[in-house]
Image (spheres, rainbow, N blue to C red):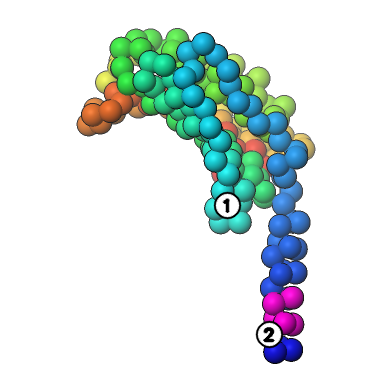
Amino acid sequence: MKHFITGLLITCSAICSAEQQCSIKSTDLNFVTPKADNIANTYWQDNKENGESVKRLYITYKDGSTAVIKHTFCSEYKFEAVYYMEDQEQTNSTKKIKTSLTTFLSYVAHKDNMQKKAIKTMMAELDKYTFVPDEVIGATYNGHESVYGDTSYSILYSPLNYSTIYSAAISVEVGIGGIH
C-alpha cells in the first residue's frame, strides 16, 4: 500500500510538472467569438491532444456555410481555420479568399509582429494568380521573430468536387514558435 501511494504521488507530481512547463497558457491568449449579422450560431469545445491544450470554435453561417477554428497551444501556438462554403459561386475571384484571410487572422489568439507583413505578402502572392473555381490556389509566408522564433502563415482555397455538402473550402493556418 505504501508503494502504491508513493507511486500515485510521483505520477501526480509528474503530471502537474508537465502542465507547468507550457510556455503558452490560456491566460496568455485572447480568444475571439465573432458576432456578425451573417452568423447563425457559435460554440466552443475544449480538449487536450498530445499534451497540448486545444480550443475549437464552431461557426455556423446563415447561408449554410460552416467554419471550424482550432487553437492548439502549450509548447507553441498553432491556429487552424477551415471555412466550408455550401455554394462555390460565393468565390469567383481571389477577393473572397483575401477577405477570408483577414477575417480569420483576426481570430488568432496569439499575435506576433509578423502578421501584418504576412498578410501583405500573401495578398500580393494571391494577386499574381488568375482565379479558376475548380483549381487549388494558395499563398504562404514564413518568417522568424526574435521573441517567438519561427512563424508560418498559409491560406489555401480548395474546390471540394466530390462533396455533396460543401462545394469549396478555404483554410488558414498560423504557427508561432516551436517547429512547424
Give the mark, 1 or 2, whose residue is nearer the N terminus. Answer: 2
Tell me the element at label 1.
strand
The span from disc 1 to disc 2 (Cα, nearest Å) is 27 Å
Quadrant location, the N terminus:
bottom right
Which residue is located at x 30 percent, y 12 percent?
89
State the SS at label 2.
helix
Above or below residue 69? Residue 123 is: above
Q: Which residue is mark 1?
A: 48
Kind of residue sitting beneath label 2? Phe
In this figure, which residue is indicated by the disc labeled 2? Answer: 4
| Residue 93, above or below 41 | above
Q: Residues within 10 Å of mark 1 (few under 14, many from 20)?
A: few
The kind of residue tagged 1 is Lys
What residue is at 60 percent from the left and 26 percent from the top? Answer: 33
Q: Position of residue 171 (x, y in %)?
A: 45, 29
Q: What percent of the width, then of the height, locates residue 144?
A: 68, 35
Q: Is residue 8 magenta?
A: yes
Asked if residue 42 is among those painted magenta in the image, a careful observer would answer no
